[in-house]
Amino acid sequence: MKKSAFLPYAQITSAMILVGSTVVAGKIISDGFPLFLASTLRFALASALLFPLVLRAENPFPQIMKKDLLRIVLISFFGNFLYSIFLLYGLKWTSATESGIILGTAPVVTAALSYMFLRERFGQKKIIGLLLVILGMVIINLSGSAPSGTPHSVIGDLLIGGSVIGEALWTLFGKTVSLKISPLVLAALTTFCGFLFFLPFGIVQAIDFPFQSLPTSGWLVVAYYGSVGTVGAYLLWYQGIPKVPASTAGMFVGIVPASAVILSYILLKEPFQWTQVLGILCVLAALVCITADIRFHKPRSNNPASPLS
């Protein structure tokens, strides 16, 4: 594979590793920080970092069609607002490891939605890759990875499942609009919309929150979530996804549980089982299968057969 062909896959891989790290960051935040307030601060920081870059790089600010602006709002609503709510509240009832495992079903959900709405076809290698991702997730689930004494409930699983749907829709809508808008502008607008969605709820939680009691580590985690985990992940994702089919990009979400499992073990001291290694290897084998001998075709800006166009 040529270097130029490999680059988009390296970008979305790096983005998903960062997203996996935010699962751990979200677990830390959910243990003692108001969730809506944390998300408001996260997207406020991300917007503050991105918009100066946009104003410097895009002069004048690009004009955006109303249809694309609506898509950007939907990207932020599903991928920022609902995803964050479901993920962070779900983390209150389950471990970061389990959350990463459930998030690993996103490739299947994204592939199904891509087939239904974007009319993307599945070649032999993509089908094999998808089956390997599913196998990896099943193996990790059968490992019994939930640590003893960790809060767990069906509600927690359902909430994390809701975040999977939000993430899949984020991928689909992001694919349709990323062909027309630069990654920097798209990242800035989606994070700003996320900030606006969370702001009213964040203000309510900020009224009675004792900011002086929050340890420095709490502020550092929020800062990481807003900068590296949001700005870095979004820029990498929006740079790579225009050159990659949505269903293929969705399969790379399988990196999230691998990253979350490893970082949960390192940072949160959650138990690590060797069966998880086998599951992670299946995910990595899937990605190798998907990216092997890929031939790139320039994506079309319009797809008349797609209901999302």
Image: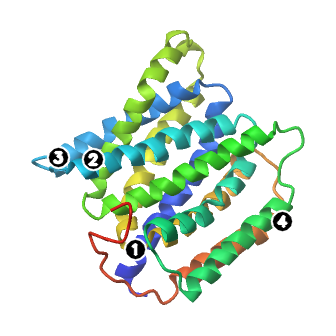
Q: Amino acid at mark 1?
A: Leu
Label whose residue precedes the other's in the sequence (2 or 1): 1
Q: Can you identify the residue that label 4 sits on?
A: 274
Total numbered circles:
4
Label whose residue precedes the other's in the sequence (3 or 2): 3
Which residue reaches farthest top?
A: 208
- Per the rendering, the mark at residue 194 is none
* Whether label 3 touches label 4, CB < 8 Å: no
Q: Can you identify the residue that label 3 sits on?
A: 56
- Above or below for 261 versus 85: below
**C-alpha span from label 4 to label 2:** 46 Å
Q: Can you identify the residue that label 2 sits on?
A: 69
Q: Amino acid at mark 2?
A: Leu
**C-alpha span from label 2 to label 1:** 28 Å
Which residue reaches farthest right?
A: 148
Badge 1 element? helix
Query: Of discs 2 and 1, which sits in the foreground?
Result: 2
Label whose residue precedes the other's in the sequence (3 or 4): 3
Would residue 46 be visible to someone looking at this image? no
Measuring 45% from the left and 39% from the top, which residue is drawn there?
A: 226
